[in-house]
Amino acid sequence: MNLDDDQMRAATHAGPRPAIVIAGPGSGKTRTLIGRHLHLHRTGVPRESILTATFTVKAAQEVRARLVEAHGDISETELGRMFVGTFHGLCVRLLRQFHDRVGLPKDFQIVGDEAQIALLKETGLTWHGEYSDLVDMISRWKDRLVSPVEASAEAARRQTPDLVQAAEIYGAYERELAERGVCDFPRLIIATVRAAKADEAVRSFLQRRFRHVLVDEFQDTNRLQIALLEALVGQGGNLWVVGDDDQALYGWRGADVRYATDFGRRFRGGARYVLSRNYRSTPAVVAAANAVITVNTVRVDKTTVPMVEAEEGDGVHIAGFGDDREEAAAVAKAVARRLRGGVRPRDVAVLFRSGSLAPVVQAALAREKIPVRLSGIGSFWSLPEVRLFVAVLRAASGSASAEDREALEKHPRRRQISAFLHTMKGAPIAAAAEPASNLVANLVPEGLAPDRTGLWIEAAQQAAIEAAECGSYARFFEHVGISSGTSTAGDDEEAVVLSTIHAAKGLEWPTVFVVGAELAMLPHHKSTDVEEERRLLYVAVTRAMRQCFVSYADERFARAQFASPFLFEMADRCGSAHPIGWRNRPVRPTPLPAEGV
């Protein structure tokens, strides 16, 4: 395997001491991980003694396939003993072996979302919001190693009724898990960590069994996963991790970028390697991305060197539009021109901060007869807030189904809904749509994560716009039915990808459009971490190999918007070497609020 100098130094790191490899976009992160595995085996480490942890099953499958190809001589027996998988997969394997030491039956079951919701309901305690949101809240507590007692204390301090209720249910839910001898996903890791800490035999076995621990996408680790790694390697053990602090996007679910930036403090004596060459993007794309990300203060200082030569037509462009419909139409026409010029649909992606931006873009592409594939986006019309909006309008129009009536009658704030319906009964859809959207926006479940709260409100606003534009209840309900049944292309089909930025991480396309780069969207108005929002734009831009088009609208969801301040950072800091073309640039930049977003 051919590695460049930076990759070779990282792959051949000499232990026993921890090491982190900071691998920027297009720098050969996975290649270096494979190189590390090969190096360890060639220096006498048995392959079954190397643990390789990934964050997704898909990533594990890719790494495993590349390891088999790189080693070339792995027998079926060795392959079966070699662990390449997720943290959860590792813990399942270990708990099956040590089940009796943690009070679990050998054939313990793992409960997914639906089973978790069923268990939550069986606690007998009332929850006034969406149970899927309650599952998320409990998972976030567990990811931070917050016990039910600590969660109750936290909720009491914040004086939030829904949080107090959630913490009480959390305790009852944990008792249900224990009594039934089942595990949800966080409990798999918690039980493993507790066993390793409390039982010397378990701890010794783990550290003998896995002499080297390799971790992919380390920047996404949370407190619970760090505790597992500490249990696996002990202090100063053979831990080798790879990731990019500039691509840390999951603070909202417990990940902490400081585990990457302060690696040497957490794991004493840890070495740091930096992969500085970008083999994916042209100089203009690299310059634009660097101009944005270097504003951040919580990051490892590094310089990225582009290794791809520019060609005519490559570059980064910014454009402003009057509203989101105009923006979507312009993007669709630009995509259509490229496809007519011979570009394959799968070589184009449209990225956005929030899935609520997808419907208008998807509709514009459909008008151009361009096939699309959705990534990271569920069906808009199946969102709980959108279903609630549609149910309210059906009731207001007098055409509510039995299912609609039951949902509204059982809603914890049914009095508020009833008052609204009394006021709006018989009103035309043009008059009812926006008030219905405001009603749904006010029914956000308390304790919902800030990011999810923003999506709830935006989705309600988008649904109202769709309703008003239909002009009548009948046309709107028909539109909902047709849109709900719209199919998209499969993974192997030629189609333009519509994706959230989160879902696009790790992927690349020759041409990328980033829409919705506005102050309220990117950075998101509900986010409390400006630097993570800046990292989102960095990730979006660095998905582009040759062309990147970033756009914003002066009006979205029928509300005035302002260009993202990140765009001014990008354009002004790029300099004359790689100038960014900006169409319809505002006279003044929009500053970030002093206290953050």
Image (cartoon, grey):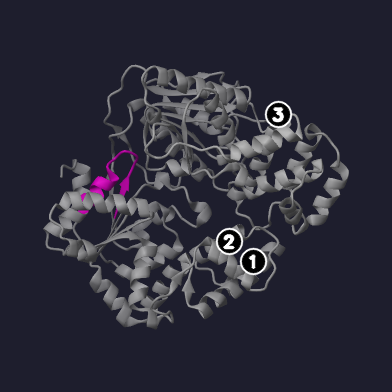
Q: Amino acid at mark 3?
A: Glu
Mark whose residue sits in front, 2 or 3: 3
Rendered location of residue 504, percent (x, y): 43, 41
Return the disc, 3 or 1, that comes first in the chain's sequence. Answer: 1
Q: Which residues are magenta?
A: 20-36
**Marks 3,1: beta carbons within 8 A:** no
**Marks 2,3: beta carbons within 8 A:** no
Return the disc, 1 or 2, that comes first in the chain's sequence. Answer: 2
- Based on the picture, tell me whether residue 24 belongs to the magenta stretch: yes
Q: Amino acid at mark 2?
A: Met
The quarter of the displayed image where residue 189 is located: bottom left
Rendered location of residue 467, percent (x, y): 71, 34
Q: Residue at x 15, y 53 (%)?
A: 71
Residue linked to disc 3: 469
The foreground one among 164 and 441 is: 441
Tell whether 166 sits left or right of 218.
right
Rendered location of residue 502, percent (x, y): 47, 44
Taking 406 as reference, is 335 above or below it? above
State how many labels appear.
3
